[in-house]
Image (cartoon, grey):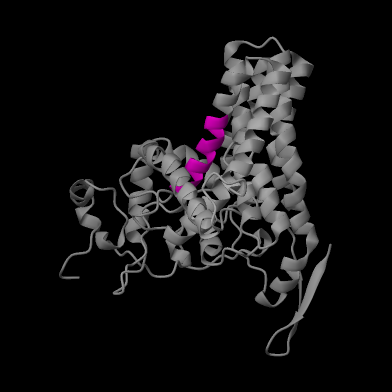
Amino acid sequence: MKGYTATLKSGEAIYYIDRKRWLWTLSVLYPVQPFLGMWLHARTGQPGWLLLPLLSGYVIAPILDWLVGEDENNPPEAVVPQLEKDRFYRVLTYLVVPLHYASLIGAAWWAATRELPLWAFFGLAMVAGIASGLAINTGHELGHKKSAFERNLAKIVLAVPFYGHFWIEHSRGHHRDVSTPEDPASSRMGESIYRFALREIPGAFLRAWHIEKERLERLGHSAWHRDNQILQSGILSLALQLGIVIAFGWSMIPFLVVHNVFAWWQLTSANYIEHYGLLRRKEANGRYERCQPQHSWNSNHIISNLVLFHLQRHSDHHAHPVRRYQSLRHFDDLPQLPSGYFGAYLLSYVPWLWYRVMDRRLLALPHVAGDLDRVNIQPGKRARIESRYRHLLATDET
């Protein structure tokens, strides 16, 4: 297995091996899960196998996260420049791009050419949508990079879930406004995921359009100019999905609607759990403090990190957004989710249970210390939260 050597400032020579090197290929293979369900359906004739990715994502993965546990190890900073230059890691993010297209087209073909009961037809659309939600994660990793090649790949892969505005909104909007009341992609204490979705999905698109419109106007162009990067990805999305309808028939229209909604829901689920209730302090000049690791919820659970290109080390990502996934670090005393993302998604889908688990974690954070003025709270919910958690709140005497 490949290793990296470096010399510390003390003169000590070190040798580092990334023991998860080949396991990162799971992030490449995970989006093609629908093909496993289709193969088992073909072998057994049982359409229930088409829903296997739902079982693996929402039952098996959380159990494996719990059994395998967490990894708090970091690569030594002295070898990070070598680790970042290693093409193996970035090639994995390139290879998965066409697989996202294959996963959607393959699932659509199967749904259109097999006699499926209605529940299996729409179940496969959900499964395809969840797999395409992972394309947003791939676009997330690629879109943060400086090379034009990787940014173009981000636009191409984001066409699969019809979410081409994401890399603009995320990099130039969400990262600027994260963990503030102004950010539609940061959830607030007391805000359910369902209410959050109604704010986040349209809010993110409108912010992306505004950012791109301003960029084009600075160049002397209108918002509808051919250089509009949202429209470029949108045209590719239309070509892909219209091609699927032409190739496989009108039944693909409801299939693709369900697919798109569930793809977007994956991003909404991630955004909801990543910054819940966290708040950056506003300074005397009216600006918010610089984003720090404590402004994102982190998770070191091994299995879900391996299939999500280390997305769950989100604290380091927001503090250092151009770091590649293999170099992201754990820090002590970070806000920690109780599970990997898949388990946290399930928790968030039951709002009262989410509040019961996460509100106490939020108030107990060292930089919050029970002070609601340090929390991003859903408007109109403060009095109710004060009443519910008065025994956990800081008092004037303290």
From this viewpoint, which residue is outermost toward the right?
1
Is residue 43 found inside the magenta-colored segment of the image?
A: no
Q: Closest to the observer: 322 or 357?
A: 322
Rendered view: 372 above or below 198: below
Q: Closest to the observer: 156 or 263?
A: 156
Q: Residue 330 at x, y = what percent?
A: 56, 65
Q: Identify the image quadrant of the N terminus.
A: bottom right
Picture mark count = 0
Is residue 270 found inside the magenta-colored segment of the image?
A: yes
- For the question of whether residue 271 can be seen, the reply is yes
Task: Give the side of residue 132 with respect to residue 357, left or right.
Answer: right
Q: Residue 339 at x, y = what percent?
A: 51, 48
Q: Identify the image quadrant of the C terminus.
A: bottom left
Q: Residue at x 35, y 69 (%)?
A: 287
Q: Residue at x 55, y 47 (%)?
A: 166
Task: Give the side of residue 215 with respect to residue 141, left or right.
Answer: left
Rendered view: 62 above or below 175: above
Q: Give the quarter of the image for residue 160.
A: top right
Q: Residue at x 62, y 54 (%)?
A: 143
Task: Give the side of residue 18 with respect to residue 124, left or right.
Answer: right
Q: Residue 9 at x, y = what percent?
A: 68, 88
Q: Give the quarter of the image for residue 239.
A: top right
Q: Residue 61 at x, y = what percent?
A: 60, 40
Q: Give the quarter of the image for residue 88.
A: bottom right
Q: Residue at x 48, y 41 (%)?
A: 268
From this viewpoint, which residue is outermost toward the bottom?
10
**First to last magenta residue range:** 260-273
- For the question of whether residue 110 can be seen, the reply is no
Classified by dominant secondary structure, the portion drawn in magenta counts as helix
From this viewpoint, which residue is outermost toward the left?
397
